[in-house]
């Protein structure tokens, strides 16, 4: 395969899906003009072309054309809506910067922006249903065989059965090592030994062979791949993911050499730009809304207790670099050294106003400025004091991985109830578990969900004092 051994097999279906998407984007824009009786001008044509190009770009970033047949419909719809949302943001920015927004009908544009994602979603649902019915009729289906009598092989078979639009017909599981140690869930799918699989492949009965042996069986895998080279079967090697650190690893390559990304930030390439645009636009919006309350709180802090209104504490940021995190002062002290004690219930250091600010999280409003500075994000792992970082990195495996992204004002751990004092190691471990889950599963949709949940769960938390 010209672009590496790890690129999935692609068919003319991918080109067909691209043509459908481009056609729908243009047709919806044309229909909106006809609906409102507005003439199409050159600006509209350019907008349609830009929309298609941008959608292709963001769709590629989200893998909509590389894996649409293999993924779940909910994930696909979510990625599609995110991709179209990014297109809308780009078009609005271009119109604003070029001062051409007055050349467009607002009714036409709003209809185009709203109806297009629905049309794209309905088209993909239709394609899936159409493919499912074709495959059920026994047309254009492909046979799938698994090498490896383990739970991973069973999961592959179950996935193929749960996604009939894939057109994968499970043939069975093959393995030479079949004894009492084989899980009971595997036995109904056992088909034979590896030699039987090779004979079936030579006979042209197998289209796909997935090898799910342990990486410790490297010699067996090498021999099997060599034997299957004399067949027409497409061969895939699925690394065993029983080591938790590999569970969400992703493939990449280094100058054509395949490699697995075990630890990496999710904000590479276009995703990094998406995250920064989200922080900039939403951060500026929230800061504009909060400016007057922040001014009132700042004056109140100064009038009710001696000391500065804004407290800056050194904390670890992206890649472990130390940054100053801003917040309204809520204590009678400004601890920022080697002995920083976490706030506790009925802590005598907390001022009466500070107790209210901490309970409502209003003390963290100045961090919106940190977001616009690029030191923090709206959503991400909450930053800890430097001294606490140095303490917990020795006690919790994977603790420093939370610094592969910028710290956030709110986070997945916080909206799930893990905010406030962490007076036991178990509590901190649970917070880190949610932080790492967020990093592994990041998406723009997840960020928006966390921001929304913060309004209902993040404020007035019972552990905030």
Image (cartoon, rainbow, N blue to C red):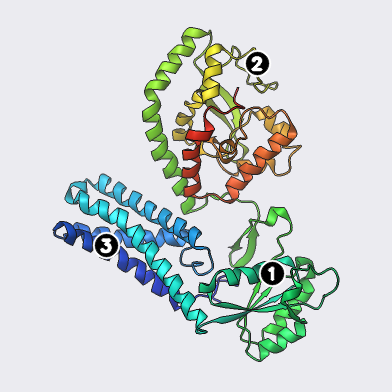
- Asked if labels 3 and 1 touch by Cβ distance under 8 angstroms, the answer is no
Residue 270's x, y, as percent? 46, 53
Give how far apart the Cα atoms at labels 1 and 3 are.
43 Å
Query: Whole-Å distance between the Cαs marked 1 and 2?
Result: 54 Å
Q: Residue at x 27, y 45 (%)?
A: 97
- Residue 103 vertical position relative to residue 18 in the rendered view, above or below: above
**Residue, disc 3:** 28
- Secondary structure, mark 2, is loop
Q: Which mark is residue 347?
A: 2
Say if 226 sits above or below 440 in the image. Answer: below
Q: Give the secondary structure at mark 1.
A: helix
282, 454: nearer the viewer: 454
Quadrant of image for the N terminus: bottom right
In the displayed structure, 362 sits above or below 285; it is above
How far across and down, in percent of the image, does residue 306 sit?
53, 7
Identified at 75% across, 66% down, the residue is: 215
- Give the CA separation, mark 3 to mark 2: 60 Å
- Disc 3 crowd rating (10 Å Cα; few below 14, some 14-19, many 20+) is many
Tell me the element at label 3. Answer: helix
- Of mark 3 and mark 2, the one earlier in the sequence is 3
* Disc 2: CA contacts within 10 A as few (<14), some (14-19) or many (>=20): few
User: Would you say the residues marked 1 and 2 are in contact, meaning their CB atoms lie under 8 Å apart?
Assistant: no
Residue 373 position, x and y percent, is 46, 33
Q: Is residue 462 left or right of residue 364?
A: right
Compared to residue 158, the image places residue 439 above or below, namely: above
Earlier in the chain: of badge 1 and badge 2, it is 1
Q: Residue at x 44, y 17 (%)?
A: 297
Residues packed near mark 1 inside 10 Å, few (<14), some (14 to 19) or many (20 plus) = many
The label shown at residue 154 is: 1
């Amino acid at each position: 395969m010209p672009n590496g051994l790890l690129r999935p097999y692609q068919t003319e279906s991918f080109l067909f899906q691209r043509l459908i998407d481009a056609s729908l984007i243009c047709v919806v824009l044309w229909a909106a003009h006809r609906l409102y009786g507005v003439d199409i001008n050159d600006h509209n044509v350019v907008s349609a072309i830009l929309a298609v190009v941008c959608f292709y770009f963001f769709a590629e970033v989200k893998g909509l054309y590389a894996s649409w047949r293999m993924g779940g419909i909910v994930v696909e719809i979510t990625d599609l809506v995110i991709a179209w949302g990014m297109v809308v943001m780009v078009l609005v920015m271009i119109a604003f910067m070029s001062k051409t927004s007055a050349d467009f009908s607002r009714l036409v544009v709003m209809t185009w922006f709203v109806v297009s994602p629905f049309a794209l979603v309905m088209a993909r649902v239709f394609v899936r249903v159409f493919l499912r019915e074709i495959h059920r009729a026994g047309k254009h289906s492909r046979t799938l065989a698994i090498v490896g009598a383990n739970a991973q092989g069973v999961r592959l078979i179950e996935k193929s059965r749960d996604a009939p639009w894939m057109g994968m017909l499970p043939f069975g599981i093959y393995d030479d090592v079949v004894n009492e140690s084989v899980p009971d869930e595997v036995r109904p799918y056992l088909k034979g030994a590896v030699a039987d699989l090779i004979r079936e492949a030579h006979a042209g009965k197998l289209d796909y062979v997935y090898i799910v042996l342990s990486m410790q069986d490297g010699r067996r895998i090498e021999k099997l791949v060599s034997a299957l080279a004399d067949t027409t079967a497409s061969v895939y090697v699925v690394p065993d993911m029983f080591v938790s650190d590999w569970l969400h690893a992703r493939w990449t390559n280094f100058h054509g050499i395949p490699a697995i990304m075990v630890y990496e930030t999710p904000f590479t390439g276009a995703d990094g730009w998406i995250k920064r645009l989200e922080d900039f636009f939403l951060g500026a919006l929230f800061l504009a809304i909060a400016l007057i309350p922040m001014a009132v709180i700042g004056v109140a802090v100064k009038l009710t207790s001696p000391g500065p209104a804004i407290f800056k504490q050194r904390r670890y940021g992206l890649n472990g670099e130390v940054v100053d995190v801003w917040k309204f002062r809520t204590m009678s002290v400004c601890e920022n050294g080697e002995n920083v004690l976490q706030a506790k219930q009925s802590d005598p250091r907390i001022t009466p106003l500070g107790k209210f600010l901490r309970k409502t999280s209003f003390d963290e409003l100045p961090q919106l400025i940190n977001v616009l500075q690029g030191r923090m994000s709206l959503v991400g792992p909450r930053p800890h004091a430097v001294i606490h970082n140095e303490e917990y990195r020795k006690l919790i495996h994977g603790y420093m991985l939370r610094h592969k992204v910028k710290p956030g004002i709110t986070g997945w751990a916080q909206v799930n109830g893990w905010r406030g004092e962490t007076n036991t190691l178990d509590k901190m471990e649970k917070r880190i578990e949610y932080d790492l889950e967020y990093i592994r599963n990041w998406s723009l949709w997840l960020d928006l969900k966390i921001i929304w949940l913060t309004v209902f769960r993040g404020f007035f938390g019972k552990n905030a004092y």
